[in-house]
Amino acid sequence: KQEGRNTYRLYRADMHAQDSQRLALETALRNTAETGDGLVVHYQPLFDRDSGQIRGAEALVRWQHPTLGMISPGDFIPLAESSGLILPLGEQLIDVIMGQLRAWHQAGLDPVPVAINLSPRQFWQSGLAEWVGQRLAHHDLPARLVGFELTESCLLDQSQAAAAILRGLQSLGCFTAIDDFGTGYSSLSYLQDLPFNELKVDRTFIRRLNDGTRSSRAILGAVTGLASELGLTVVAEGVETAEQLERLKPYQIDLIQGFLMGRPSPAATFADTWLAPRRM
Ligand code: C2E
Ligand code: CA
Ligand code: CA
Ligand code: CA
């Protein structure tokens, strides 16, 4: 009995510790969401598979915490989503990325289109396209330099409403991409109904090619063939080895992204490595 009570109290104490840790993290995240301080964006290049030319970049957020150091998105995006902070945080992030594109332009560089990840709450926030249009005007950027990636979980059961939002973004001139394709509730029929410019095949499919099974080849062939037929730009993500790149050869893939070609890196490193001076 005594022991049970002690255990109970230990458990309670532990709960408090976890709660207050979470609260402290949330408070720090709220500060970042309000000020933008601590938001760090890394950029990973995407290349044309055939020519090897750079075609774009994906913006990947990190959080520089005042005492804990650099935190990866997998470790704070869920908190940002559950606390609702993803909305102000996402707005800060879009401004940071657009500001970066403008800064590259002003430095005489030729920026590449940058894809921004949107979480479901951001995607469904009303007036998204209007807000994006306003920020593009504020930063004096051509819309073709900005695109948005969303996962299938954003679209579930709401494809008509989702299509309207996607069309709103596209009519600004932004591109739209379906991310991690094949991991969720993917149904190939989505592809026909939703206005996407780009399809990113999830890296699990690329990895599975290593085992060389007939079914993994068949699935990849079906997805890339249909997407390509529908006029989508097909991206293979998570290409890590030269062997994987070789195995992708038979498939209709336009762009490649992965550690083999380039890791996500801070804006300055990315620009030094990949951005060319603008021809006047
Ligand atoms: P994602 O959108 O699928 O992003 C690609 C992830 O794969 C990135 O991880 C990237 O660093 C990693 N990656 C790239 N190439 C390779 C490769 O060759 N091999 C392997 N193993 N991994 C590779 P990261 O940066 O840790 O981001 C993780 C996830 O966090 C992203 O997955 C995305 O869902 C989310 N995320 C990142 N930035 C944002 C953001 O600004 N907003 C939102 N809402 N989510 C974000
Ligand atoms: Ca992504
Ligand atoms: Ca992805
Ligand atoms: Ca091609």
Image (tube, rainbow, N blue to C red):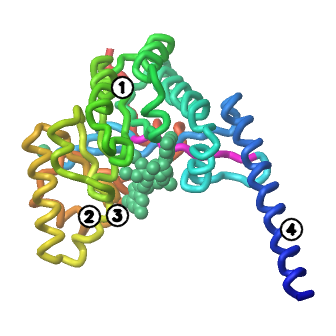
Q: Is mark 3 within 8 Å of ligand 1?
A: yes
- Residue at position x 33%, y 47% from top? 152
**Alpha-carbon distance for marks 2 and 4?**
44 Å
Q: Who comes first in sequence, dot 4 or dot 1?
A: 4
Q: Could you tell me residue 120's position as x and y percent?
A: 45, 40
Q: Earlier in the sequence, mark 2 or mark 3?
A: 2
Frontmost residue, 195 versus 266: 195
- The residue range painted magenta reads 58-65
Q: Are marks 2 and 3 in contact (CB under 8 Å)?
A: no
Q: CA distance from mark 4 to mark 3?
A: 44 Å
Query: 139 or 154: which is nearer to us?
Result: 154
Q: Residues within 10 Å of mark 2 (few under 14, many from 20)?
A: many
Q: Which residue is mark 3?
A: 240
Q: Earlier in the sequence, mark 2 or mark 4?
A: 4
Residue on which disc 4 sits: 13
Real-space Cα separation, disc 4 to disc 1, in angstroms = 50 Å
Residue at x 31%, y 30% (from the top left corner): 161
Residue at the disc numbered 2: 205
Amino acid type for the residue under numbered disc 4: Ala
Position of 209 relative to 59 (above/below): below
**Looking at the image, do the residues carrying marks 1 and 2 touch, with CB atoms under 8 Å apart?**
no
Secondary structure beneath dot 2 equals helix
The amino acid type found where label 2 is placed reads Phe
Find residue 145 and name its label: 1
Does dot 3 land on a helix, a strand or a loop?
loop
Q: Nearer the viewer, mark 2 or mark 4?
A: 4
**Other residues around mark 3 within 10 Å, as few (<14) / some (14–19) / many (≥20):** some
In the rendered image, the residue lying farthest to the front is: 1
- Magenta span includes 243: no
Marks 1 and 3, the one that precedes in the sequence: 1
Q: Is residue 253 left or right of residue 57?
A: left
